[in-house]
Image: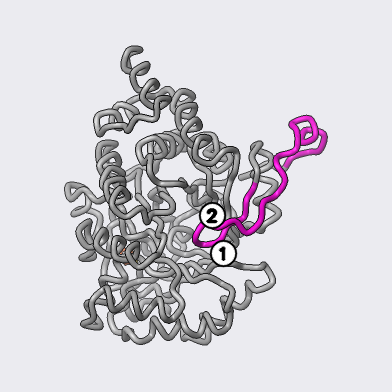
């Protein structure tokens, strides 16, 4: 990038001016990570100071049986496959109860599009989970699942969300977004929920008072311009509804064979590499700068590893996904030694060690507890620090 354009972009960011599509592409063109980080850190600090939010949650996948076969997905199984499973409602409740001692505040539930499970199963699970764990907030279902419920129930998304909210639903999850541009989407997504339905369902949830997350799956066959387009669509919707609480760039992962039948289900990995840590940090930074009206940017550390999670706090990220005891959709695909369990204390030390103040939040980003600011560097260095994977 030439020095003139660099100065121009820098001036826009410091003046709080909205960046354009061309600006977004130009930022992705830059390999000056330190510069990108500085700009993103300015924006992040303006919005969130030196706070890093996290919550203590548990991820549950009620079933991995799915009618679709998305090209990047290592999670889905077809009915009758060796490790296909569907939880009974009491099983789901038992698994959720196992985390009670962790002062869990949220359950995050996403699932395959099961071909024969009746619609009634889903509100019933929520009701029973809520009865068993009344203080726990239920963040459940992607827009893709809600559109699937429309298909299997004959109800509208409006009626479905009303019933799910009545059963205890606090928020949708942000998945199913992947990359909205059809040029890419047609090659990776096999279900029927695209931008029109995804945005319709989230806008509806926002009108009903929900705060929802939005995701982007990057690092596969898309180009930077597709990432920019993805964020700009979300930014425009956010201008209308104000209902997105957080943006979560998710790194596409290869499928490392760990399924019972040894099959690799990810059909695009032969022609893709995974995004490097530098590419991920750039994606966090550009997302923070472009998506100027979303309050938070999250790093779901299970996908990135803890070292990148720490670094990303200087690249626009101010939210880390909390204690994850069980998460299958992406972790099936990880062979880099990233733990799939973090507890509150581990996370606090990870945040302090990076020089930030941990703040525990709930599903709607209300503060549950503010922790001390980071101890001074001298104090931190006086004790041996943990080295994160
Ligand atoms: S990404 Fe979701 S909808 Fe697509 S195959 Fe996997 S589980 Fe099914």
Residue 84 appears in view: no
Residue 172 drawn at (x, y percent):
39, 66
Q: Of helix, strand and loop, which one carries label 1?
A: strand
Q: Nearer the viewer, residue 131 or 80?
A: 131
Which quadrant of the figure shows ligand 1?
bottom left
Taking the image as shown, residue 143 lies to the left or right of residue 151, namely right
Mark number for residue 321? Answer: 2
Tell whether circle 2 marks a residue whose Cβ is less than 8 angstroms from ligand 1. no
Is 364 magenta? The answer is yes
The residue at which mark 1 appears reads as 57
Number of labels in the image equals 2
The answer to whether mark 1 and mark 2 are in CB contact below 8 A is yes
For the record, the magenta segment spans: 358-385
Where, quadrant-wise, is the N terminus in this rendering? Answer: top left
Q: Residues within 10 Å of mark 2 (few under 14, many from 20)?
A: some
Nearer-N-terminus badge (1/2):
1
Residue 344 drawn at (x, y percent):
67, 57
Identify the residue at image location x=44%, y=27%: 36
Residue 183 drawn at (x, y percent):
17, 47
Q: Nearer the viewer, residue 268 or 159?
A: 159
Q: Of helix, strand and loop, which one carries label 2?
A: loop
Q: Is residue 103 above or below residue 52?
A: below
């Amino acid at each position: 990038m030439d020095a003139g354009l660099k100065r121009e972009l820098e001036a826009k960011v410091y003046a709080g001016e909205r960046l354009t599509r061309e600006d977004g592409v130009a930022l992705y063109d830059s390999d000056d990570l330190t510069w990108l980080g500085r700009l993103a850190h300015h924006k992040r600090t303006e919005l969130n100071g030196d706070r890093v939010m996290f919550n203590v949650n548990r991820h549950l996948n009620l079933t991995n049986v799915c009618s679709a076969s998305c090209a990047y997905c290592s999670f889905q199984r077809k009915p009758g496959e060796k490790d296909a499973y569907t939880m009974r409602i009491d099983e789901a409740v038992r698994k959720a109860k196992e985390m009670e001692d962790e002062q869990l505040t949220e359950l995050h539930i996403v699932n395959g599009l099961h071909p024969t499970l009746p619609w009634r199963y889903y509100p019933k699970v929520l009701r029973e989970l809520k009865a068993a764990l009344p203080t726990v907030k239920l963040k459940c279902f992607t827009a893709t699942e809600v559109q699937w419920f429309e298909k299997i129930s004959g109800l509208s998304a409006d009626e479905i969300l009303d019933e799910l909210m009545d059963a205890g639903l606090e928020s949708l999850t942000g998945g199913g977004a992947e990359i909205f541009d059809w040029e890419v989407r047609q090659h990776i997504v096999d279900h029927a929920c695209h931008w029109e339905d995804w945005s319709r369902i989230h806008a509806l949830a926002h009108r009903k008072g929900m705060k929802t997350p939005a995701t982007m799956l990057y690092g596969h066959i898309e180009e930077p311009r597709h990432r920019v387009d993805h964020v700009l669509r979300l930014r425009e919707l956010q201008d209308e509804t104000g209902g997105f609480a957080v943006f979560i760039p998710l790194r596409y992962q290869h499928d490392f064979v760990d399924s019972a039948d040894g099959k690799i289900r990810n059909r695009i990995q032969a022609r893709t590499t995974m995004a490097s840590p530098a590419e991920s940090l750039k994606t966090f930074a550009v997302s923070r700068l472009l998506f100027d009206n979303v309050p938070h940017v999250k790093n779901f550390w299970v996908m990135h590893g803890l070292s990148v999670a720490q670094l990303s706090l200087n690249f626009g990220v101010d939210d880390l996904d909390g204690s994850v005891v069980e998460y299958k959709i992406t972790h099936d695909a990880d062979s880099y030694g990233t733990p799939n369990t973090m507890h509150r204390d581990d996370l606090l030390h990870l945040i302090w060690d990076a020089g930030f103040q941990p703040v525990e939040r709930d599903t709607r980003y209300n503060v549950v507890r503010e922790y001390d600011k980071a101890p001074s560097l001298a104090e931190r260095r006086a004790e041996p620090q943990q080295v994160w994977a």
